[in-house]
Image (cartoon, rainbow, N blue to C red):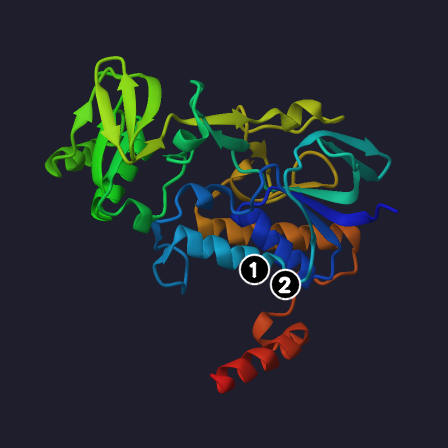
């Protein structure tokens, strides 16, 4: 029998992952729902980028933070649903019914929206491609060890394309850029750096055909035919923000998308809460560290919504009995090594 969750968290990015951990700490039965086939949100877009602005955390790659957040989110064994896109939310008395592209309808007492700017998926090439060619095309930054010393063609002219071209060059790849426009649209300083590094840019070049010749890709564009070992596509992202259009209730917006929360986490609909970049409130900070704070606040609000007698926050982890056994295991492992 399908359980009724205390809370269903929609969105498996940093805000949703940390909320999953903290909700478990507060003894809530939760489900974490993610439309994509992996957790991590936008951190998965920038696996090799260094993140400096999380308190007490040394500069770390995006993929390292992503890995640790996913592990932390599973501390209290939430139910995790991947490849599950919520396409309709109904409110029946005090219970929410969440319908998705999967067969199961989830039931929840509350919902925590942690969907950032919505579902983002990279825009992919629409031309015919063989399997061998597809294996050499990336839509996120590839493994640096794979591209070191290799020819990498970056297709695109926005911030991500320019940043990735520079980053790949720094990892030792032989980089060139192809762009359909007449002028790169990346940040001026980054475009200047691209030029200073001597990375060639081919303008007015829309990809028309890709075939493999020996070990190389031959990328036929409108003007040039370019050879490369690998191709990195940065043509932007498809954005799906349709969730709010299929609710049986209205949620007050701050602008075209963000939710207007006069108090942090509190939306205009009873039982619906928000965390991370999906919400707006006065003083809202759109930083990774800010998302963690948002999630703690949201979970505490939900806990008191479910139980008015509940404490307003959980005991700090350093003195929390729930970590006693886990701490002993950690200490034992350290002594063993």
Q: Nearer the viewer, residue 323 or 210?
A: 210
Q: Nearer the viewer, residue 137 or 296?
A: 137
Q: Nearer the viewer, residue 258 or 221?
A: 221
Q: Eyeballing the image, is 186 above or below 149?
A: above
- Which quadrant would residue 312 be assigned to in this image? bottom right
Q: Does the image show residue 157?
A: no
Whole-Å distance between the Cαs marked 1 and 2? 7 Å
In the visual, does 59 lie left or right of 304? left
Under circle 2, the secondary element is loop
Q: Residue at x 74, y 54 (%)?
A: 304
Q: Residue furthest bottom?
A: 335
Q: Eyeballing the image, is 95 above or below 18?
A: above
Q: Does the image show residue 324?
A: yes
**Dot 1 and dot 2 residues touching (CB under 8 Å):** yes
Q: Which residue lies under the disc numbered 2?
A: 75
Q: Which residue lies under the disc numbered 1?
A: 71
Q: Residue at x 63, y 49 (%)?
A: 298
Q: Where is residue 201 drawn, in percent x and y?
A: 19, 26
Q: Where is residue 252 drawn, in percent x and y?
A: 63, 28
Q: Residues within 10 Å of mark 2 (few under 14, many from 20)?
A: some
Q: Residue furthest front?
A: 214
In the visual, does 52 lie left or right of 258? left
Q: How many marks?
A: 2
């Amino acid at each position: 029998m399908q359980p009724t969750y205390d809370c269903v968290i929609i969105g498996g990015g940093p805000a949703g992952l940390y909320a999953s951990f903290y909700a478990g700490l507060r003894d809530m039965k939760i489900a974490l729902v993610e439309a994509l086939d992996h957790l991590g949100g936008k951190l998965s877009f920038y696996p090799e980028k260094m993140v400096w602005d999380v308190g007490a955390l040394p500069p770390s790659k995006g993929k390292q933070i992503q890995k640790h957040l996913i592990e932390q989110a599973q501390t209290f064994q939430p139910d995790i649903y991947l490849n599950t896109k919520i396409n309709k939310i109904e409110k029946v008395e005090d219970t929410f019914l969440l319908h998705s592209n999967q067969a199961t309808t989830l039931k929840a007492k509350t919902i925590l929206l942690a969907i950032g700017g919505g579902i983002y998926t990279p825009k992919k090439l629409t031309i015919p491609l063989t399997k061998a060619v597809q294996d050499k095309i990336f839509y996120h930054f590839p493994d640096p060890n794979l591209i070191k010393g290799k020819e990498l063609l970056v297709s695109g002219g926005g911030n991500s394309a320019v940043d990735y071209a520079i980053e790949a060059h720094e990892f030792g790849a032989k980089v060139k850029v192809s762009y359909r426009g007449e002028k790169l649209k990346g940040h001026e300083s980054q475009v200047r750096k691209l030029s200073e590094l001597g990375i060639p840019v081919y303008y007015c070049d829309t990809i028309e055909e890709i075939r493999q010749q020996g070990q190389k890709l031959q990328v036929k564009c409108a003007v040039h035919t370019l050879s490369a070992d690998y191709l990195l596509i940065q043509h932007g992202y498809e954005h799906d923000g349709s969730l709010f259009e299929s609710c049986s209730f209205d949620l007050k917006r701050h602008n075209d998308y963000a939710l207007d929360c006069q108090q942090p986490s509190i939306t205009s609909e009873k039982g619906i809460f928000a965390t991370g970049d999906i919400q707006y409130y006065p003083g809202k900070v759109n930083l990774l560290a800010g998302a963690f704070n948002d999630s703690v606040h949201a979970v505490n609000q939900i806990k008191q919504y479910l139980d008015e007698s509940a404490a307003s926050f959980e005991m700090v982890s350093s003195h929390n009995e729930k970590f006693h056994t886990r701490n002993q295991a950690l200490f034992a492992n350290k002594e063993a090594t």
